[in-house]
């Protein structure tokens, strides 16, 4: 994507009007373009200024009473099918940018993404690792924003495993930990970089947990738990395979879950 | 006098989106009374026109009616050339600040000063918004405050989505420019 096209896309991305594929393409451009990043941050600053300083005028109580009175005198009829409002969410990149410092301080990584001063000097491997971490967070958030975080709904590992095998030829190790409080919800296929990878989805209370099964090893930096906007990423081994957990679990629960996964033979 | 028999869903829709309607009215008409009256008109009109709702975002359908009522009110207002109270611009806080500084211990004065700064920012932003041409102002309010999608905004404004996009872009650029200008100006005065 050249910068001219990106500039036209910028507002669409910022306003959440791009589909997944287009968002990804735009984010790739963002990685390389300081001007577009700056423009995006300016848009965000303007929005924040408006929301803080031009707060919504709430309807006066008197008006509400007037309308309520009018409305209750009306007869009831079935409501039309309400057109679901599309969930508005902040562009992931901004959420990411806001938490970059925190994330990498917590993760003990020396990489600081998009820090233009030192970016080119970073080892390519560290940069790739950071990119992968970013992809995994983004996938998790997209899944949370989607209508359903799973493509196959099942609490039965004998359903989930063959489903993956049929779709992408990978049969990850699948276990249900419902008894330990981590119930298997299902699975989906998502992207890590340009690779399609299996994602096992678990639920713990209100928390949704993604386990990305990575087809290659040692691409996630060590045992570093990474933190981003309240979400954590932790590298684990899943039946000898490299995997990454992403969720908003607290560190204690995350570690407990990681130990469960590590325990699979 | 005719009684309006509206289906119940109109009441739910209007009450559920009453703040959105009133807020839009406030930014289009500039004062409480006109905004409240416009929303009231809009409810009656929506009740009569319930059968014109043809799917899509019900919220956008309702806000479109609210907007039309606001525009109608604006037109009569302009025709009548009546005096209308526009939301008063905030007062100059200069004297207030110096009195506070005389009366309060330093730390408390600082706190009050911060609050004044906040009030000042609000005033600046509100003024910048009010000074925007109405078509940019309403588009920005619907997007940034009410968080409507482009499709919904297009439905409210009854314009193509392309127009929504260009108004958003232009409105944002204008507002950024105004705010950058006032920020620079206030920095100069602080520096003196």
Image (spheres, grey):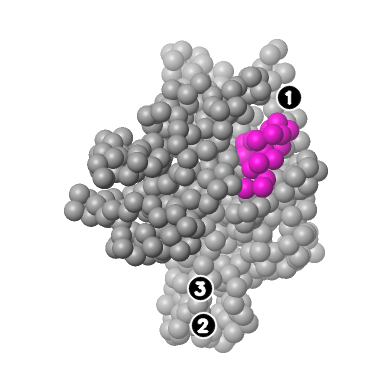
Point out the stretch of residues depicted in magenta.
A24-46
Identify the subunit bearing mark 2.
B
**Disc number placed over residue B185 in the picture, else none:** 1
For residue A21, what is the image quadrant?
bottom right
Q: Judge whether residue B112 can be spotted in this image.
A: no
- In what element is the residue under mark 3? loop
Separation (CA) of disc 1 from disc 3: 48 Å
Q: Judge whether residue B35 can be spotted in this image.
A: yes
What residue is drawn where x is 56% and y is 71%?
B58
Residue receiving disc 3: A82
Residue toward you, B50 or A10: A10
Residue receiving disc 2: B6
Dominant secondary structure, magenta: helix
Separation (CA) of disc 1 from disc 2: 53 Å
Q: Earlier in the sequence, mark 1 or mark 2?
A: 2
Percent across and percent down for residue A112 are 55, 25
What residue is drawn where x is 38% and y is 42%?
A241
What residue is drawn where x is 45% and y is 44%?
A214
């Amino acid at each position: 994507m050249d910068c001219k096209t990106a500039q036209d896309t910028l507002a669409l991305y910022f306003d959440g009007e791009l589909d997944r594929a287009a968002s990804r393409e735009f984010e790739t451009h963002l990685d390389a373009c300081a001007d577009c990043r700056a423009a995006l941050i300016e848009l965000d600053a303007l929005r924040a200024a408006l929301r803080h300083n031009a707060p919504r005028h709430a309807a006066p109580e008197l008006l509400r009473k007037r309308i309520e009175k009018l409305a209750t005198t009306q007869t009831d009829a079935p409501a039309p099918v309400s057109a679901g409002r599309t969930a508005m969410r902040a562009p992931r990149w901004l959420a990411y940018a806001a938490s970059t410092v925190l994330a990498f301080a917590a993760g003990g990584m020396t990489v600081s993404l998009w820090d233009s001063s030192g970016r080119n000097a970073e080892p390519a491997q560290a940069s790739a690792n950071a990119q992968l971490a970013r992809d995994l967070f983004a996938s998790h958030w997209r899944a949370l924003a989607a209508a359903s975080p799973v493509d196959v709904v099942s609490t039965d590992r004998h359903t989930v495993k063959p489903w993956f095998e049929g779709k992408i030829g990978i049969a990850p190790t699948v276990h249900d930990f419902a008894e330990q409080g981590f119930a298997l919800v299902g699975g989906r296929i998502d992207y890590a970089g340009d690779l399609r990878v299996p994602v096992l989805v678990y639920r713990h209370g209100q928390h949704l947990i993604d386990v990305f099964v990575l087809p290659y090893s040692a691409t996630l930096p060590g045992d570093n738990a990474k933190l981003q906007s309240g979400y954590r990423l932790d590298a684990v081994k899943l039946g000898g395979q490299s995997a990454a957990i992403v969720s908003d679990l607290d560190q204690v629960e995350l570690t407990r879950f990681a130990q469960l996964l590590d325990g699979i033979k | 006098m005719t009684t309006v028999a509206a289906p119940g869903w109109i009441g739910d829709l209007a009450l559920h989106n009453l703040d959105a309607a009133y807020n839009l009215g406030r930014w289009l008409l500039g004062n409480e009374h006109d905004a409240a009256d416009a929303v009231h008109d809009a409810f009656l009109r929506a009740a009569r026109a319930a059968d014109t709702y043809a799917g899509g975002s019900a919220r956008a359908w309702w806000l479109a009616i609210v907007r039309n009522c606001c525009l109608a009110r604006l037109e009569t207002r302009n025709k009548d050339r009546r005096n209308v109270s526009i939301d008063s611009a905030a007062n100059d806080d200069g004297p207030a600040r110096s009195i506070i500084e005389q009366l309060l211990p330093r730390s408390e004065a600082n706190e009050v000063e911060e609050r004044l700064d906040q009030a000042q920012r609000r005033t600046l932003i509100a003024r910048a918004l009010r000074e925007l041409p109405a078509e940019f102002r309403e588009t920005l309010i619907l997007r940034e405050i009410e968080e409507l999608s482009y499709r919904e905004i297009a439905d409210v404004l009854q314009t193509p989505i392309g127009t929504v996009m260009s108004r958003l872009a232009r409105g944002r650029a204008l507002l950024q420019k105004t705010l950058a200008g006032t920020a620079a100006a206030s920095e100069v005065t602080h520096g003196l």
